[in-house]
Image (cartoon, rainbow, N blue to C red):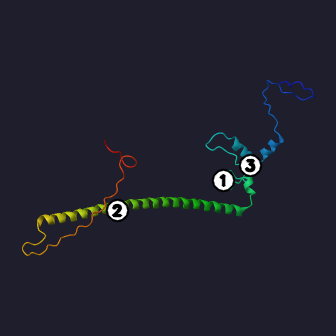
Amino acid sequence: MSTPPPGPQGEPTVQAASNFHNAEPRTREERLAAQSREKLEKQQLRARRGCFHRYEEPGSPLVPEPKSPMYADESDRFRRDAAAEMRQQKVEAWKRQQEVYDRKRVELMGKEQQRWEHMAEEAAAEAARMEADEMTRYRSTLRSQFLFNKHHSVPHNILTGEVRPNPAAVPPAPQPPEQPPQGRGGGPPARQ
């Protein structure tokens, strides 16, 4: 084999058709990183492509992730008035409790109103029933008086001559319940 002609400064040059592989020289950082075993392993893990586990850079262990409970914004980190925050929390809790009380109060007032309306309706129905009962008692008294008069044609006992007592005194007639006016105003229209 012949040696290639010397270059401009007397160095041998590599021909393109030769069997040699030219490698780029490594930088100082690459050489120092290759010496550190830990850095080398981390670099190999990052460059790994197969298997199930993919290496992810953990980041700084001193800075918590935004989703973690330790995370705080810069503005929150320097807020130092803890007493005002606690008071604000107490005021908000008190307001929520007052809203609950107000809601319960309104519900109970509605239930109480319905109960009073129901009691008034029952009282009106009871009054109507009592008026109907008074009318029924009056009619039964009139009927007993009518039957007594039909069975006894004379007001005295024929055999002894004694005056027969009336079985029941007829009370005055009760007033019929008031009915709303028909036609114009209230109530259903009259049929034609």
Could you say whether the residue bearing mark 1 is in a helix, strand or loop?
A: loop
Could you say whether the residue bearing mark 3 is in a helix, strand or loop?
A: helix
Mark sitting earlier along the chain (3/2): 3
In the picture of the structure, the residue carrying the numbered disc 3 is 38
Position of residue 31 relative to residue 19, above or below, is below
Q: Is residue 119 left or right of residue 75?
A: left
In the picture of the structure, the residue carrying the numbered disc 1 is 68
Position of residue 142 relative to residue 18, above or below, is below
Instruction: Sort mark 1 into few (<14), some (14-19) or many (20+) by Cα contacts within 10 Å.
Output: few
How far apart are the alpha carbons under marks 1 and 2?
Answer: 72 Å
Q: Residue at x 46, y 60 (%)?
A: 113
Q: Residue at x 17, y 63 (%)?
A: 146
Total label count? 3
Instruction: Sort mark 3 into few (<14), some (14-19) or many (20+) by Cα contacts within 10 Å.
Output: few
Mark sitting earlier along the chain (1/3): 3
In the picture of the structure, the residue carrying the numbered disc 2 is 127
